Image (cartoon, helix red, strand yellow):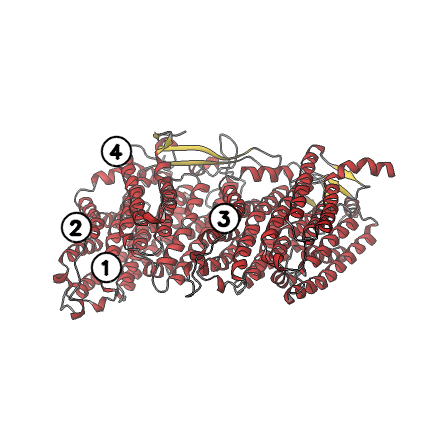
Amino acid sequence: MQPQIFNKLSYFLPETVLIVTLIVCILADLILKKKSVIVTVIAIIGLMVSGYFVYLQYELGDVSLFKHMIVIDPYSIFFKFLFILSTIFILLFAVSSREFKEGDHKNEHTYLFLALTLGAFLMASSVNMLMMYLSLELVSLTSYVLAGYTKKVKRSSEAAMKYVIYGAASSGIMIYAMSLLYGFTGTMNIYETATILSGIGSTTNPMIIISIVMVMAGFGYKISSVPFHFWTPDVYEGSPIPVTAFLAVTSSAAGFSVMIRFFATTFLKSFVNVAGAWQIIDGIKWTEIIIVLSVASMIIGNFVAIWQTSMKRLLAYSSIAQSGYIMLGLVVANQAGLTAMFVYLMAYLFMNLGAFYATMLIANKLNSDSIEDMKGFGYRSPFVCVAMGVFMFALSGVPATAGFIGKFYLFSALIEKHLLWLALIGLLNSVVSLFFYIKVLKYMFLMKPDEGYDSKIQYGYGYYIMLLLFIVPTIFFGIYFVPIVRFAEASASMFGLK
Amino acid sequence: MVQFPILGIGILSWIVFLPVLGMLAIVFIPKAYEKSIKYVALAFPILQIILSVILLLNYNKDLSGINKIEGFQFIEKVSWINIPAVIWEGKVNIDYFMGLDGISLPMIILTAIIGFVGALASFSIKRNEKGYYMLYLFLVTGMMGTFCALDLFLFFVFWEIMLLPMYFLIGIWGGERREYAAIKFFLYTFFGGIFMLISIIALYFSSKDPVTGMHTFNMLTLMNPASIDPNSLLGGVGTNMRYLAFIALFIGFAIKVPIFPFHTWLPDAHVEAPTAISVILAGVLLKMGSYGIMRISYPIFPDAAVWFMYPMAILAMINIVYGALCAMAQKDFKKLIAYSSISHMGYVMLGIASGTAIGFNGAVFQMFNHGTITAVLFLSVGIIYDRAHTRGLNDFGGLANKMPKYFAVIIIAFFASIGLPGLSAFISESFVFLGGFKNETIRVLTIISTLGIILNAAYILWTIQRLFFGTLPEKWNNLTDISGRELLSTVPLLVIIIILGIFPTPFLNLMTSTVNQLVNVIWHLN
């Protein structure tokens, strides 16, 4: 058994690189004893090397590691790329974050982010419920620390506390549900679970439905889906902005990676036909549960966002709504839906990180993230605000942005499956969302700055380049979306599920 | 395939994307030369006019268009999005496909003219000129693109992208309640857009190109009944799903026209928008809705189109009469013109609802005429507002002596708006009524709609009386008459109005074969 594990270690290189980088970062931090960009540079190089090894895995096809604990497949590789890209961006965020600069920490955030990425890697590739739970906990525990990172700020500590309590409750419920499933089937491996469940024939046992709902408590908490979203606004508001961005993008994508794999494997009878439609086990109608959660997330997220006055809280509710949109792709239960979710996640990476970055730049200068305070900011710093405009329109799904392409693919998948009413609900929601996204722009451009606060604000060129890194893909993939769609289609294949 | 290239790029791409070049030019104008921005911005609409004259001169009026690619001219068809097949999904193929026929050419000419007039009228903008002209040029690109696109995806992108500059143009440079008006406009149109999007996606998945066997966004292919898969969502003829899809498209277009009961955004947007933007709104934007119905809804859903002609005629009638009645009740000059637009767009809708060649002819011609006439009227409102800073009709009187040139300009536009013989709108309105009368099912509705003419004359004559006759209030003793720049923006339009009123044949000939083809497609005559 041991030789087998060691043989497979070479497949575990990306994760190993992350662990080594993490340790090097800690050592560097100990040696330097002060805030330094060097640690960040080391971390970014480590991530890139890890990304290179992920790229090499592409040729492997499907591999199962460590006695079917984790797998390597195009599906997990897609998410690993997503995590690496977003973590690099967030490390760059952290360099320019005022909250991080003024805090009394040195470089701890760097290796905490790396640990989070490691957890996210494992989430995307685990096929065993225990492994899923453990990797999810790794991400959660590190997130708690990061949420309370600026420990002298009262709100930050409050955020961390709330996050811990909600997190503990959710994961407790999830592990209980998993134990129920284990009691029912006698296995933790999701593929074996699927075989056993479909062997039973038509399953109407209420326990399975109950355990699905309870498992959703854990996943829903990670992707901040209604009704497990209550922590989101408070934690987003209290945490430093890079951490918030991390929670909104990386952590939420990690939640999706494990959730999609769990549902698309555990409750499928037979694996995909040529048309790409999944065959759900009779009697276990999990897609209906997803529909309810998705619609609730869209509606609550979008409508509550209208009344928000803080930019971070607005983005929090927007993330809740966006999770609702992404879940729509799971509802259709076919490969086209999966592709659409991938396309959306990629678009979401750029536009949402961009929105957080622009928010951070503005908040750095204003020392506040209240939308009211951004009055007339468009005249004080046109470039940052135009960038914000691009991200807001992209998030609401206006054409010629990547956000539109994401929505277009999602709703196409729904309409192809004749779920017209669901598509209509989703699209009507995007009209509602436009209302609050544009509210931000209203304050920035339609209102004039107050007397005495109308001086021009200059940022260094580095910041503009960073913004361009988000703007260019957001617009380019809106006009020419072949690359992201092809990448998504190539990745929409899970271990044993093609 | 690119026909009629200039420097290797098709002429339609030039005319659509020239303003984008203008935007780039404006970005790089340094602060010291800020005064030149407006002239740079003006240059691009002039270039567009030149290009549209070239289009007009090279246009072959015998070709028909609508559903046959051979009938289109200045075609540009280049693969845009091409995603090879994966097992579970067909290939995705979206073309950058543009072309002109007899109903889009008049709209291109109109957009070029109004784009120029609007840029000239923008000279009174003093705040943030850089941003203003960039957004303005972006808007022109969106409008041109919408009229050129022959691929539904491309059409939708142009259609929606226009909202962004419009929102800021109204919201930043508008009147007192500009924020409200801007968001109302944006939300209304975006709301309509989602119904359109659902319909477009449903069409996409129902289609199967007979040649390639793939789904398609190509409008011309979708018009071919053979390319709709009979087992799909929108398969068959006259099914409920097809009717619903027609309604969804119709809502998208009706909000833009605007057709009662979707019209409430229009008075707000018009009143709050700066003059140039009102001119663009009334002159071009409203036409996109009626154009869309003729270009997309009718030929793709001929079965539903025939069924919905009667309800559409009812809405058209309401638009005509209700719009005129509302106009009559207004005390604000600009709001009056806004409501008169609703009434006049009702004529367009009546012509479209008639389903006859002469009705369509009248509708397209009315679209053009309404564009030119309302542009003059909004410019006139702007002229008086710039001087008096009020638009209250009851605040004025006796201006005829004080501003004789202004009076001359506005009186021609007013009479054209009434439909006085010898001016362009007379021809188009009579064509619309002839068409409506020819179609027996909507004959009664047409007769009721003629009431609109009387109401129209009533409120316009009353407006003339309130503005120009009687005694001049003392506070207006120092009003100056119309300036050279203002004459430059209005007189060309008046010339067009008069020429088309006296000798409309060449213009009508441009669209005749296309309109006949549209009738053939709807009634399956060939």
Of all chains, the one bearing label 2 is B
Neighbour class for label 1 at 10 Å: few (<14), some, many (≥20)? many
Residue sitting at the far left: B401
The residues tagged by marks 1 and 4 sit, at their Cα atoms, a distance apart of 36 Å
To the question of a shared chain for discs 3 and 1, the answer is yes
The quarter of the rendered structure image containing the C terminus of chain B is top left
Q: Which mark is residue B38?
A: none
Q: Is residue A144 above or below residue B294?
A: below
Q: Which one is earlier in the sequence, the residue at label 4 or at label 2?
A: 4
What residue sits 59% from the left and 55% below the top?
A: A97
Q: Amino acid at mark 3?
A: Ile
Instruction: Single out the mark in the foreground, 4 or 2.
Output: 4
Nearest the viewer among B491 and A458 is A458
Whether labels 3 and 4 share one chain: yes
Q: Position of residue A346 (x, y in %)?
A: 59, 45
**Would you say B520 lies left or right of A304 here?**
left
1 or 4: tag closer to the N-terminus = 4
Q: Which residue is mark 3?
A: B198
| Label 1: element kind | helix
Type of the residue with mark 1: Asn
Structural distance between the alpha carbons of marks 3 and 2: 44 Å
Residue in the foreground of this view, choosing between B210 and B185:
B185
Dot 2 lies on which element?
A: loop
Pointers 4 and 2 within a single chain: yes
For disc 4, the neighbor class at 10 Å (few under 14, some 14 to 19, many from 20) is few
Residue pointed to by mark 2: B421
First in sequence, mark 2 or 1: give its number.
Answer: 2
Residue B55 placement: quadrant: top left
Picture disc at residue B57: 4
